[in-house]
Image (spheres, grey):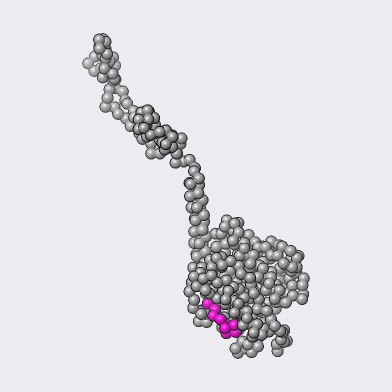
Amino acid sequence: MTVDDSHSRTTPRYPPAPGAPPTPPPRLAGSGPTAEVPRYKRYRAARLLLPRAGAEDPSVAAQRLRGHGSGVPPARRRRWISPSRPTPKRVLVGVVALVFGWLLLSLVLFLVSSHFERTPLPTDVAAVLDPAGNPLTSTNNILVLGSDRRQKDSLEPGAETTGFGRSDSIMLIRTGAGAAARLSIPRDTVIEIPGHGLQKINAAHEYGGPAESVSVIRHWLGIPINHVVEVNFENFPQLIEAMGGVTYTGGCVLSNLDGGSSDGGFTLRLSAGSHHLDGKQALALARTRENLCAPNESDIQREEHQQVLFTDMKNQLLSPMSFLRLPWIAWSTPPAIISDMSGEELLAMFAALTVTGTPPTRVLLPTGQITLPSGEDGLTISEAARRADVARFMSG
């Protein structure tokens, strides 16, 4: 409110009518020469910065008071809408802003976690990798490994607790620029490893780590390998928990991990059908070597179990509920990955895998068996079968 005290009531508001008696002078307060004429203050309302909810547009009100002098029909006059009133457009803009902010938060958390929480590969890996462009816009062959090295306090019989350990799982992924193919290599496949003779292919990782695995597989298959991704099983359960668990559908599984629950380890019991697994159960399934529920299963069935698990992980990531968990998933993913790729390249790889969908995983099927000098039984693959599977992979 503003105050205007420049006027007094000493002057009549309206002039007297003709012939009317003069207006008597105002009554003075007090008496004598010091008497003063009372003064009155006039108040004017200041213009509001924002109109009140439900208030009428001042221009419309003025036009209405003037009797619609502008000639604009009432039906065509603009209706005044309070800024506080929700409209479909405002709701849509708010939802889009919320989604964008949620995605931006997840992106920042992923990049920060990639920088501070991710374990890098040994420096000798870069020397054996073939150069390639961005995993989203250029076709890349990515070698995915899972080491069977356990923690030092592991009680699992025969488990590797030192060194690199043997590769528990071996899979090639072809992605980027529309390519989509997967090729799984059984770990018991026997090949020639330089300096060690005939050995199972998973022993290359034990002899020289991921760099040796890249060199041996690249030479044996005759294809370029551009990147390596190792699953850090130590942090794998945290990623599964951040995703809200995964669903496994398959046959009966019974395995003892780290000596089983009776020796302080973990025992996995799954009946045939579908089961929702938490982090520890998913890790046990991925590491299961011997399925006591099906003793006749070979390494091929073990690879199939892992593929079912990883496929459902991807489906889980694309589900609507995962969007609500996205910041936690973004933070937990880099610690579960050991790779030569930077955070930006990992994001590009995940984007490429999302765009191309989930292709069927082909398994490099063995064509025979062999007994190694150590007495272990291994699998052999003929050159013709290997070339045929590699050709299908490279054309994917």
Q: Residue at x 57, y 71 (%)?
A: 180
| Count of numbered circles in the view | 0
Q: Residue at x 64, y 65 (%)?
A: 312
Front in this rendered view, residue 382 or 252: 382
Q: Quadrant of the N terminus?
A: top left
Q: Residue at x 46, y 36 (%)?
A: 53
Front in this rendered view, residue 80 or 70: 70
Residue 354, quarter of picture: bottom right
Question: Residue 387: within the magenta?
Answer: no
In this image, 73 relative to 40: left or right? right
In this image, 393 relative to 372: left or right? left
Residue 274, quarter of picture: bottom right
Front in this rendered view, residue 348 or 176: 176
Image coordinates of residue 278 in percent, x first then y, are: 67, 62
Question: Residue 226: within the magenta?
Answer: yes
Image coordinates of residue 337 in percent, x first then y, are: 57, 70
Q: Is 9 above or below relative to 58?
A: above
Front in this rendered view, residue 357 or 199: 357
Q: Is 365 above or below relative to 108?
A: below
Residue 42, quarter of picture: top left
Q: Quadrant of the C terminus?
A: bottom right
Q: Mark yes or no: residue 341 visible.
A: no
Magenta span covers which residues?
218-228
